Image (cartoon, rainbow, N blue to C red):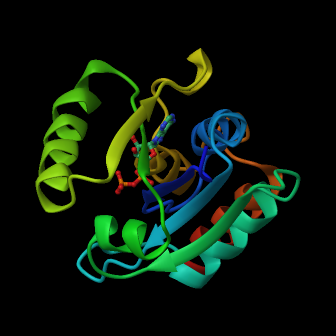
Amino acid sequence: MPEHIAIYPGSFDPPTLGHLDLMQRAAKMFHKVIVAVANNEQKQALFTVQERVEMLQEMVGELANVEVRHFQGLTVEFAVQNKAVSLLRGLRAMSDFEYELSLAINNRKLRPEVDTVCLMPSEPYLFLSSRQVKEIASLGGQISHYVTPSVEQRIRAKFNAKK
Ligand code: ADP
């Protein structure tokens, strides 16, 4: 069997324990997983791409077959350049389904050789999103159940700097 490489693309602004849950699952399924931080200038982000890569690198430290990169442009093209045949995405509540389905079908039209694989996180992370983590943190709420201590510190520093 050839080496099976998966790309896990996303904004990861910031990376959460839900993202980590998915990476841990994928690390057991694929020979190699490349976490790919999208450098999308249209989306206003709290963290720079470099900061997001650093946070993810800290998080995947013990997963030997997971690496972190950033990319610009079409996700499927980045996948092909990296010899990946799977695109990993997370499915949380039903609300993710329609969006992920349309993304998967459109990506398949662009590059039929790359297939999307969706994984479901553990229950505590089913309703967790980066957006909500930022909202809660900006209002001074607890986020320690949702992100690693190091990511929590960085989020707090961002919001303190904005005050
Ligand atoms: P994007 O802007 O591409 O949606 P995100 O960083 O929000 O980037 O998410 C990247 C991927 O991770 C998506 O497939 C999303 O569904 C998945 N994801 C986000 N949060 C979670 C979570 N709590 N559990 C499982 N998957 C998640």
**Residue with the most extreme right position:** 62
- Residue 31 percent coordinates (x, y): 68, 48
The quarter of the picture where the C terminus appears is bottom right
- Residue 85 percent coordinates (x, y): 42, 53
Q: Residue at x 40, y 36 (%)?
A: 117
Say above or below: 138 vs 37. above
Q: Residue at x 21, y 52 (%)?
A: 112
Q: Quadrant of residue 34?
A: bottom right
Say above or below: 37 vs 29. below
Say above or below: 94 vs 75. above
Q: Is residue 163 visible?
A: no
Q: Is residue 118 visible?
A: yes
Q: How many marks?
A: 0
Say whether residue 122 is left or right of residue 86: right
The quarter of the picture where the N terminus appears is top right
Q: 127 or 136: nearer the eye?
A: 127
**Residue with the most extreme front position:** 1
Say whether residue 56 is left or right of residue 34: right
Quarter of image, ligand 1: top left
Q: 44 or 55: nearer the eye?
A: 55
- Residue 48 percent coordinates (x, y): 52, 82
Say whether residue 47 is left or right of residue 20: left
Q: Quadrant of residue 161?
A: bottom right
Q: Residue at x 27, y 20 (%)?
A: 94
- Residue 19 percent coordinates (x, y): 58, 44
Q: 129 or 119: nearer the eye?
A: 119
Say above or below: 14 vs 77. above
